[in-house]
Image (cartoon, helix red, strand yellow):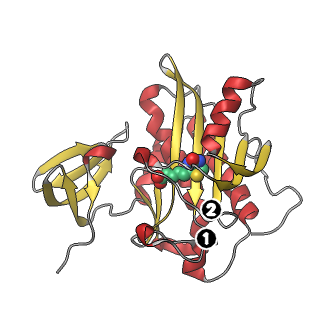
Amino acid sequence: MTLQNNIFSGLFVGQNLLSLKEVDSTNNFLKNLLTNSKPVPEGTVIMAETQFAGRGQQNNKWHAEPGKNLTFSILLKPTFLSVTEQFDLTRAVSLGVYDTLCPILGSALKIKWPNDIYYGDKKLGGMLIENILQGNQIKSAIIGIGLNINQDVFPDEASNATSVKQILHKDYDLRLILAEICNNVEAYYLSLKAGKINDVRNAYLNRLYWFNEQKRFKAGDDVFEGIITGVKDNGLLVVQQNDNENTYNLKEIEFLNNIKP
Ligand code: BTN
C-alpha cells in the first residue's frame, strides 16, 4: 500500500471520518448520531481506539485490545435495495474487507458465511450490520466492522481468533487498512447500485469458506456431513446432505471442526 495525501481515494466512504478515543460501541454511536442531530452524510465512518461495550453477532460481545485493532462503523443509505435484498449489502461489505486483506494474506483468506473473515480455520474479524428500514426499503445501514490487526495474543476464551500480526509477525498501519476497506466497500456498493448484483453474488461465492467441500455441521441435535452448495438470494445457506438440499439461517446451523479421520 502506498501512502498518499488523501488515502481515502473513493467518492464518499470515509470522507467524513470521526476518530474516537473511547466509546461504548461505534454502531451505537452512529445510531445515536442518526436520531439526535442534523443529517449525517452517507459514507460517514466512526472509528474507535477502544470500545468498552463492543457488540458482536447473536448478542455476543466483541473484545479487541485497545489501539491495536480496527473497530469502526460505516453509514450507508442503500435506499435502492429492498428489504429482500439486504443480504447483497452483506456480500458487498464482506467482499470489500476481503479484497483489502487478500493482497496481504493470500488465498487462505475466506469469507465464512454469512460475514466472518477467516484465515484458515481462524477468525480474523466480523461484522454487525444493523439496517434501519422504511417500508420495503433500507433507509440506512450501520455497518460495524471489527478486524484483528496488530493484537499479539488472545484470551483463552477466544481460542479461535487470529490477527494479521499473528499470521505475518509484523505491525500494520490501521489507518491505511481502514482507508483501503472504505475504498473497496465503496466500489462493491457502487456495483450493487449499478445493478451488477450477479457479479457481487458470484464474487462472494468464489471466496466462501467450505464452499463445495464435504464438512461437518450441526443443526439442532443433528450432526451431519454435508456440502455447502450455495447461498440463496436472501442469504440462507444451502447445504447438501446425501441427496437433499436444505437451507439454514444463522441460528439454525453451526460449522463443526474438520472431519476427524
Ligand atoms: C461478529 O463477528 O460477531 C461481529 C463483530 C462486529 C464488531 C464490530 S467492532 C465495530 C462495531 N461496533 C460494535 O459494537 N460492533 C461492531
The one of 118 and 104 positioned closer to us in this rendering:
118
Q: Position of residue 140 (x, y in %)?
A: 60, 29
Indicate whether 218 appears above or below 86: below
User: What residue is pinned by disc 1?
Assistant: 103
- Image coordinates of residue 74 in percent, x first then y, are 65, 43
Measure the alpha-carbon separation of dots 1 and 2: 7 Å
Pointer 2: what residue? 100
Q: Residues within 10 Å of mark 1 (few under 14, many from 20)?
A: few
Quarter of the image with the N terminus is bottom right
Near-viewer residue (78 or 165): 165
Q: Secondary structure at mark 1?
A: helix
- On screen, 60 above or below 109? above
- Image quadrant where one finds the C terminus: bottom left
- Badge 1 vs badge 2, beta-carbon distance below 8 Å: yes
Q: Residue furthest left?
A: 243
Q: Position of residue 17 (x, y in %)?
A: 78, 46
Farthest residue to the bottom: give it.
Answer: 169
Q: Residue drawn at (69%, 62%), measured in percent from left and top?
A: 177
The reply to whether residue 3 is visible in this rendering is yes
Residue at 33% x, 60% y: name it.
211
Tell me if residue 160 can be seen: no
What amino acid type should be assigned to the residue bearing mark 1? Pro
**51 left or right, relative to 62:** right
Q: Considering depth in this image, is 3 or 143 the residue closer to the camera?
A: 143
